[in-house]
Amino acid sequence: MTVFANTQQAQQSFWHPMAHPASVRQSAVTRIVSGEGVYVTDDKGQRMVDGVAGLWNVNLGHNRPEIKAAIMHQLDELAYYQSFDGVSHPRVEELSARLSAMLAPEQMARVMLSSGGSDAVETALKVSRQYWKLVGEPERTRFISLRQGYHGTHFGGTSINGSLVFRRNYEPLLPGCIQIDAPWPYRNPWNAGGEELGALCAAQLEREILAQGPDTVAAFIAEPVQGAGGVIVPPANFWPLVRAVCDKYGVLLIADEVVTGFGRSGNMFGCRGWGVSPDIICLAKGITSGYIPLGATLVNQRIAGAFEQNGNFTGALMHGYTYSGHPVACAAALVCLDLVEREQIPANAAKQGDYLLQALKPFEQKFAAVGEVRGKGLMLALDLVSDKASREPVDPMDGFANQIARVARAHGAMVRPVGTKIILSPPLTIQLPELDILVNALDTAFSQ
Ligand code: PLP
């Protein structure tokens, strides 16, 4: 292994995603060097509860021997082989069958594997477009998504992302991508809440479909609980109403479960928590607990059938990645899925998430800067405001969220500042004592 004598040069070569190069002061970078269970340790020896599970993904905790053993075993047996056009290997087939079985209640029929969440979304968008061509409605090319939604960084995902900040540097984007208001109880144009808000947002979707022309809309895509946009938990009627609107106009429904898949929102899958079966499901992150990159896109029989009934190149999915079904990633996923089921991970996420939410809720009264604490399962956000009455967010440029995160880290809690929010998404294996460390560190940070 190359060891750079000049660590400063090594550090400066690394281009931090989602940050201006000049804004990343090297002296302030938190460098994580090891992880064990729900803890990580930085290069100065500071041990912290990993309040963000890497990046919403190390759901089973760090340094799990079972996952490492599966990876090592697969490396010995077959490190890589492709799974294109008629070539295959056992792990890719086993994992595809396993995912279809897990999602049998949602009637998922086929699985396309890839390397992460952005790939999974890109696959979903391209499959949607091709589906409509196969069934003789080639004009259906548009995608509707939610403001504050996050769907990754490929051009497809960038085009449907709900925040301008992810889109504007990369225009022109995919044509025909439209965003509608998110079902966000804390901030929405109607100042509505509960079922009223769910109905208003679903009605907006219907109006938008009609405005675009139903025969031009390919799909509606959303996260069951919006994550990166600030952990936005929709009213319970929103997803069932969305399913009904999509059915009325034949529009495909895509659930981006990259964050919510495999337990994070307290259900095995986020859409299951809302009692809805989408047509396409995107998965990544928790599928391998972050140990190895992997994404998956599942489609139901409505879509799979259309491909099967068409011959030659029209019915062939002309899409796939060198690392679609990487054997090592599949082996890691297979053991992770066993652990998720055996350790009843979604139930623990629901239980510990309730505790964390209740423990943090008093911050709304205690601290002037905390407008709202919200969450579902083990995905939570503290919404930072400059004025509680108007719910005006803090200035994202003043570095307040970063300051909170810095003090929390010094007190043993790794938390994530995202714009005007502090995000919490710890490993789903977390227990009470570590949750208390997160709460106390944040209490100290806000007090200071
Ligand atoms: N979709 C959602 C809901 C996400 O939260 C993310 C990443 O955070 C993505 C897609 C993109 O995933 P990746 O970063 O693995 O490409």
Image (cartoon, rainbow, N blue to C red):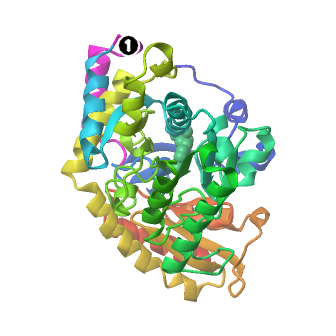
291 or 244: nearer the viewer: 244
- Where residue 168 appears, as percent x and y from the top left, is 79, 46
- Where residue 247 appears, as percent x and y from the top left, is 46, 54
Asked if the residue at label 1 sits under 8 Å from ligand 1, the reply is no
Q: Is residue 71 left or right of residue 5?
A: left
Q: Can residue 17 be seen at all in this image of the molecule?
A: no
Q: Quadrant of residue 126?
A: top right
Q: Is residue 329 left or right of residue 393?
A: left
Mark 1 lies on a secondary structure that is loop
Give the labeled residue for mark 1.
Answer: 81
> Ligand 1 lies in which image quarter?
top right
> Going 60% across and 81% down the picture, which residue do you hit?
192
Q: Which quadrant is home to the C terminus?
A: bottom right
Q: Can residue 248 be seen at all in this image of the molecule?
A: yes
From what the image shows, is residue 432 above or below residue 146? below
- Where residue 69 appears, as percent x and y from the top left, is 26, 30
> Going 55% across and 61% down the picture, which residue do you hit?
409
Bounds of the magenta span? 61-87
